[in-house]
Amino acid sequence: MIIAIANQKGGVAKTTSTICLGGLLAEFGSCLAVDLDPQGNLSVGLGVEVADSQLSTYDLITEQVEVGEVIVSTKSGISLLPADITLAKGETEILTKVGNFLILKEQLEPVKSEYSHILLDCPPSLGLLTVNALSAADAVLIPVQCQFFALKGLAALLETIQSIQKRLNPELKILGVLPTMAEKNTVMTKDVLNSLRQRLKGIQIFEPVPKSIKFTESNLAGEPIHTYADDSKLIAPYKEIASLIAGE
């Protein structure tokens, strides 16, 4: 499966979730993670600093290279298409290209059969990079932070997904919503979870991921949470989703 991890709101743990899921999925089979955020946090979180001369998703999305030329290995066992700030200008450069919504899908085609799972870490926007990810994906996972403004903008994302399903990718499914940074027994977390269940009927709401500094520490260490910290509470929500994806 190709899974897009998307939410136009920043700071909801998209990248952390990509790393956590990628590490677990790499144990089920081969996994490729694609960094589509010009901030390059996924690359850094997997221990890859993109050098000036290194090929990246900028070169891929602007169709200058083949996908196999960009893929690098990481110590966690996840293969990676890395990104850096040059990707921001790449999004602008493909604006006038015919079929620009489908470039990523076409570029990934040669390696689809080589990987059991492909994860697309989307930028915090509903721009062309995110649309490319949703057009290429089989399903989308939506991380949502358990905070006051968590649901703000979620309607816009769901509308974008519906438009993609209608016009570009009729097979796209919503895998579910993943509540993140949950603080146990707080009114805020309970309210957000209740709101998600009430407003998103028919969409799976996964077990919330607890708030923990260990996620930041594991990203700085360049490894997934399940190899960094022996804490079942932190790992369990991602194990549930990884098992669901691997079983599809």
Image (cartoon, rainbow, N blue to C red):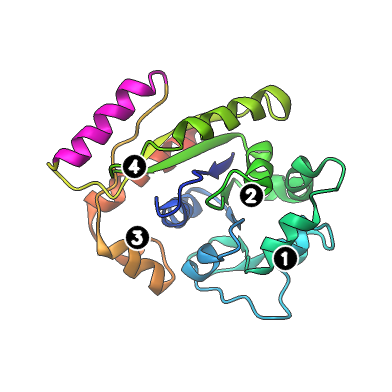
Disc 1, SS: loop
Q: Nearer the viewer, mark 4 or mark 1?
A: 4
Taking the spot 83% from the left edge, 40% from the top edge, the residue there is 99
Q: Which residue in the protein does label 1 denote? A: 70
Picture layout, residue 239 above or below residue 203: below
Q: Which mark is residue 115?
A: 2
- Say which residue label 4 marks: 149
> Amino acid type of disc 3?
Ile
Q: Earlier in the sequence, mark 2 or mark 4?
A: 2
Mark positioned earlier in the residue sequence (3 or 1): 1
Q: Is residue 190 magenta?
A: yes
Left or right of residue 59: residue 219: left
Q: In the rendered structure, are the residues bearing label 2 and label 3 in contact, judged by CB atoms less than 8 Å apart?
A: no
- Tell me if I can see residue 171 in this picture: no
Amino acid type for the residue under numbered disc 4: Phe
- State the extent of the magenta-drawn residues as a range: 187-202
Dot 4 or dot 1: first in sequence order is 1
